[in-house]
Image (cartoon, rainbow, N blue to C red):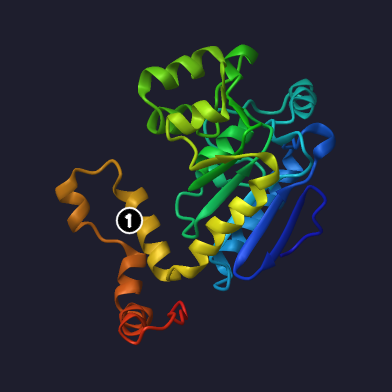
Amino acid sequence: MTAAHTRVRYAKKDHVAHITLDRPEVLNAMDLRMHEELADVWDDVEADDDIRVAVLTGAGNRAFSVGQDLKERARLDERGAPLTTFGSRGQPGWPRLTDRFTLSKPVLARVHGYALGGGFELALACDLIIASEQALFGLPEARLGLVPGAGGAFRLARQLPLKTAMGHLLTGRRLDAATALRYGLVNEVVPADRLDACVGEWTDDLVRSAPLSVRAIKEAVLASVDMPLEQAFTARYAWEERRRLSSDAAEGVRAFTERRDPRWTGR
């Protein structure tokens, strides 16, 4: 970690990285400084082999994140700053989570309250979403003369039925937690007072899994999801090659036959 963080809280414990968007006074709206801090955090998550899973959430009890800080965007527009479009290349904090396509660790979004605009796009870029009953998702960009440039237009159409996704993208209509669960957009919805316990159950299960297997599976799934099935079977996956040749590949079977818990080394 290279800089003092004022917009993001970052802590590591028991193989879990905890990342908190920390601007609750503005519903965790993301300004350029926050994006720079998050880039620093994601670099560390990937580099630290002791971390096996990351949990991303928002501070306070009202929002995960409402997305781009539009007041900052208005000031940038007044100064003649370049207008943005799809992706974060050339912008502070690049590559942001939404276009960090090779991040090998699983990321779990803990969502309570509003997840709108870029906040929803952050959640869509995560591998798992655990939401409270009060979670509310939406991409309001069409109502603001903008586009969901952090991948929302692309990911929502891949994670929902196309007509359903288009309905929300073109109108800015919101999805409540129950609807998101019905469409399989989130993994689990629980009462707010159960949210942390539920997230803990998921991270416990992830940490129990072999770290190289988790990374190999994530890579293979995301790299092959648009491939023909025959090509998916024959494609090369770097993390699978590491897993296959690792001591952990034998440790799981050995622990099963010896009726004990496996001791993963990640090597």
Q: Where's residue 184, x and y in %?
A: 43, 35
Residue at which label 1 appears: 220
Work out whether residue 58 or residue 35 is closer to the camera in this orientation and state it.
58
Q: Quadrant of residue 154?
A: top left
158 to 2, vertically: above or below? above
Q: Quadrant of residue 64?
A: top right
Measured as percent of width and height from the top left, residue 24 is found at 81, 38
- In this view of the protein, which residue sits in the foreground, 34 or 161? 161
- Compared with 85, 50 (above or below) is below
Query: Is 80 left, or right, of 235 in this rendering?
Result: right
SS of the residue at dot 1? helix
184 vs 98, left or right, is left
Residue found at the far right of this picture: 25
Residue 120 point in image, percent of width and height: 59, 33
**Does the image show residue 118?**
yes
Q: Is residue 264 placed above or below 74 in the rendered structure?
A: below
Q: Residues within 10 Å of mark 1 (few under 14, many from 20)?
A: some
Image quadrant containing the N terminus: bottom right
Residue 44 visible in the picture:
no
Q: Position of residue 6 (x, y in %)?
A: 83, 51
Q: Viewed as shown, does residue 28 lie left or right of 258?
A: right
- Residue at horizontal 68 percent and vertical 66 percent from the top: 12
Q: 197 above or below 51?
A: above
Determine the residue located farthest toward the left in the rendered image.
230
How many marks on residues? 1
Q: Identity of the amino acid at label 1?
A: Ala
Residue positioned 81% across, 59% down in the render: 4
- Quarter the C terminus occupies: bottom left
State the residue at coordinates (63%, 71%): 14
Please report the residue visible at 38 percent of the width from the left and 32 percent of the height from the top: 158
Which residue is at the far bottom?
258
